[in-house]
Amino acid sequence: MPEQRAEDWAVTATGLIKRFEGKQVVGGVDLAVPRGAIYGVLGPNGAGKTTTLRMILGIIEPDEGYRTLLGCERPRDAGDRVGYLPEERGLYPAMKAREAIAFMGALRGLAWGEGRRRAADLLAQVGLAHAADEKIRKLSKGMAQLVQLLGSVVHRPDLIVLDEPFSGLDPVNQEKLEALILAERDRGATILFSTHVMAHAERLCDRLAIIAGGQRQFEGTVDDARATLPAQVHYQPRQPNPALAAQLPAGATPEGDGWRFAMPPDGIEPLLNRLIAAGHGIAGLTIERPTLHEAFVRIVGSVEDRRFADRKAAA
Amino acid sequence: MSPFRRALRQMLTIARRDFIATVFTPVFLLFLFAPALIGGMSTIGGLGAASMADGAADRARLVVIAPPPLAAILSREDARLRKLFRHDERPSTLSIVAPQPDPAAQARALMGEQGRDTDAVLYGPIDRPSILVPARSRLTGNYLEALAQATVSAGRPDAVVVSATRIAAPRPAVSLGGQHQSGFLAVFGIFFLTLFLAGQVVGTMAEERNNKVIEVLAAAVPLEAVFGGKLIGMFGVAVLFVAFWGTVLGQVAALIPPAIAADLGTLTPAVGGPAFAILFAAYFSMAYLLLGSVFLGIGAQASTMREIQMLSLPITLVQVGMFALASAAARLPNSLLARVAEIFPLSSPFAMAGRAANSPEIWPHLLALGWQALWVALFITVGARLFRRGVLQSGGGRPFWRRRPRDPISAA
């Protein structure tokens, strides 16, 4: 496996630990986000996703561990090349939409005039041109959220960090947001976002990490995550035959006119050969790959089960 | 871009936002014209109170029971003695009453007369008079005694009326009294302006906390720059306020009567007028920034408006305390107290403004301004760190000497 330097990654985190009032919220998270990727941080509520992102961005300091942001050991040094949409959205209510976007750009080093010009373009892109001179307090929650999102990309950052970007958005705006994320990736930006909605991660992520119990439980591609569970096979023989169960993998259960079982470790072909040779034939065969949702539930569920058992043992 | 330039740019971005958000609101007009409203109401109240006081004064009197031959001399001497008093300090009107068979009883009757206030009654022989006077009116009794003395002196056949020739003396270029007055006015002026303006800074972080904007700012900008920007923004508002009223008062100054203008001419700061004006502006700025940075740091810890309102009393007390310390220092230049007030950061701008009035050296002011600027930076840094730890709940991380070298990252 080749060794890469921190400069080669958009984000690296090694053993990040954070405690609030003695309670460990993040317990040693490692992350490595490749440049130019869309990277999802998935986890149930309270998993430590937001705290991890805040530590990576330098909003809070980790109690232990190290991180780099765009190759910089001090996140502030990369500040002008980063965009951030926090989980708790926040804008000045008296500011106009265009000014709010330009202001956020100005904080990251973009000249005000250029910021206003880009803001107008971005607002038009997401169909909010009519709201450019509206005060934030007059916008709907979804519109304000989009404005804030535009504020986090107006300076064309190399890294965009989005904390639960889809929460609170209706399906139309969610689609706009997905399109915006893909457009930013195509521009060359790295996108790191947290979510607990699997559908978005499944559609968008090049790689993802699953955090649960304050620790990273999985890291890889969506396919890797799905591969943590065996595919489900639905096999229908030519003739129903109760004796067939003995020839199927353990755990096979009858379903309709056929059987359902997990994909054998050596694949489906040897099994099918045996079944054909035994004269059962194949009337129907469906192989269902597990969804990310199922993989997530299994990974997170096993962590929760372990924690529950630990708590019970401690009690 | 260097970290300093970046921080400066971020500070100015935040300052610009705060300045515009504060100034371009209807409430700011109310704030800007507040002194006019307060002044107007004070004038109306003052006129009413003065009118009531004048009415009461019209009904008050001093009474001398004396035979008619003395009445003319008493009136003349009373008129002469009254010139020694300022208008508002003059004794009540003098009434001269002819004696009755029992002057003591007559005096008591006059004293108790309904419908008029009688401050004191003099009766008996003019060279050995008795004065009926309430215990609290000792000075009124003294005046009647002096009037009797003057009347006796003027009644003598060999009385001489002194008429002095007055020659206008050149005003000394520098007088100790003028310096002390200048010092006190400088201290009071800075105190008044900071009392009026610096307290506003205390609640400025509340907006960001309530709107959750602080998360956006904290991610984009070091908290020190956020604090610095907010302080500069509010200082800009204060400067606008001072410039506006400075211009207004400058125009009004042209209408000041010559006598009062001449009195103002006695204000002779030791460093000279122009340097004093520059130092006054510099020390006002530093006083604002010092107190503002402390108030900003404290106010940022408050999580509700109620907590911010509760802070207003201790904040006012701190300002009054600094004013008292600096006033005492201005009265006692070169004393140990003055040195303490000049060095203690929060009172330093006040005390150094007083020093500018009393001492001609300039170099201590350059030193003091640097010293004060250092403390502004320190207060901002401490305020930002407390905010980071207390509000953002961020630990300090490992100190640099405990950090181990970072391992190379293996490709995932």
Image: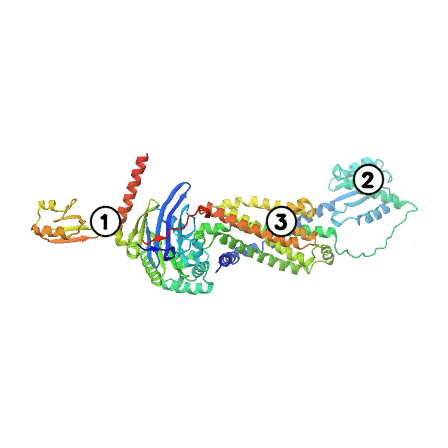
The quadrant in which the C terminus of chain A is found is top left
Looking at the image, can residue A110 be seen? yes
In which image quadrant can residue B112 be found? top right
Name the spot of residue B107 as percent of width and height, x first: 80, 37
Tag 2 residue: B122
Nearest the eye: B48 or B202: B202
Q: Looking at the picture, does residue A214 appear above or below residue A84?
A: above
Cα distance in 3D space between marks 2 and 3: 55 Å
User: Are the residues under marks 1 and 2 on the same chain?
Assistant: no
**Label 1 CA crowd tier, 10 Å (few <14, some 14–19, many 20+):** some
- Chain name for mark 3: B
Tag 1 residue: A229
Residue type for callout 1: Leu
Q: Earlier in the sequence, mark 2 or mark 3?
A: 2
Nearest the eye: B234 or B60: B234
Cα distance in 3D space between marks 1 and 3: 71 Å
